[in-house]
Amino acid sequence: MYKVFVNDCPIFLTENNNISTNYKKVKFNLTEIKSIINDLFQKKLSGIYLICDHLENDWKQFQSLFKIQKAAGGKVLNIENEVLFIYRLNKWDLPKGKLEKGESIEQCAIREVEEECGISKLTIQNPLETTYHIFERKNKIILKITYWFLMRTSFTGELTPQTEEGIKKVIFKNKVAVNAALHNTYENIKLLF
C-alpha cells in the first residue's frame, strides 16, 4: 500500500478491495487522478482509496502524472533520546530538504538537518518510512518523495534555526513534548512515530 497526502488528506493506493474504511473507494483509473487531486485540494474529499489491480504498475503510472521532487531528512535523537523538531509555518515538523545534484539521499538528509538546525555530529542509524505528499507550486502539481532516517547526535551546543527557510524554532523535545507536538504537525510526520 502507498499513502500520499494532499493537504493532510490521504490517497491510499492498495490492492485490498475488502478494506474497511469511511473514505470513498474507487477503482484505480489514471484518467481520474488529476480530478481526485483537485477535489482533495478543494477539500471536496477528506481522503480516498484507489483500488489497484497491480499495485506497483499503478504506482508507477500514478507518479508519471507529476513532477517528482526528492527530499531527505531526519528524526534525530540526542543522548537523552529527545527528538529534534523545527517550527515553521505554525506547525512542528522534522528537518528535511531537497536533494541536490550529485549527492546521495543520506548526504542530503545529514546536510539538510545540519543546515536547518545548526547541528553537527550526526550519524544515521537506519532508514525510516518514506513519505509522499502532493502540493502545487508555480501552477505545477508536484509529488514530493521524502526519504527519512533515524539519526543520533552527541551535539550539546546551541541550536540555530535557518530563518531564511522560515524556521522560527529548533528544539529537542522529550516524550511528553513530542506527543503534544504531534497534535500540531503534518500527517506524514506522524507516520514516523
Image: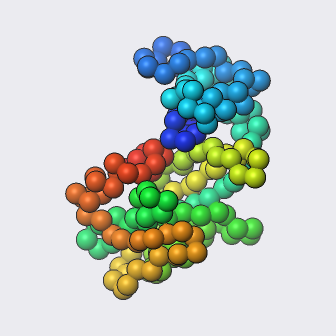
Side of 26 relative to 95 (left or right): right
Look at 46% across and 48% down and name the residue there: 186
The answer to whether any part of residue 138 appears in the image is: yes
Look at 75% across and 68% down and name the residue there: 101
Side of 119 relative to 156 (left or right): right
Q: Up-down: is 68 above or below 102? A: above
Look at 41% across and 72% down and name the residue there: 170
- Is residue 176 or residue 165 the one in the foreground? 165
State the image quarter where residue 2 is shown.
Answer: top right
Q: Where is residue 107 in the image (x, y as percent from the top left)?
A: 60, 70
Classify the position of the N terminus by image quarter. top right
The colour scheme applied to this rendered structure is rainbow
Q: Which residue lies furthest to the bottom in this view?
A: 157
The answer to whether any part of residue 1 appears in the image is: no
Q: Up-down: is 12 above or below 141? A: above
Q: Position of residue 92 (x, y in %)?
A: 41, 58
The tally of labels here is 0
Look at 58% across and 45% down and name the residue there: 132
- Is residue 63 or residue 46 the one in the foreground? 46
Q: Position of residue 23 (x, y in %)?
A: 48, 21
Q: Which residue lies furthest to the left in this view?
A: 176
State the image quarter where residue 177 is shown.
Answer: bottom left
Q: Where is residue 176 in the image (x, y as percent from the top left)?
A: 22, 57
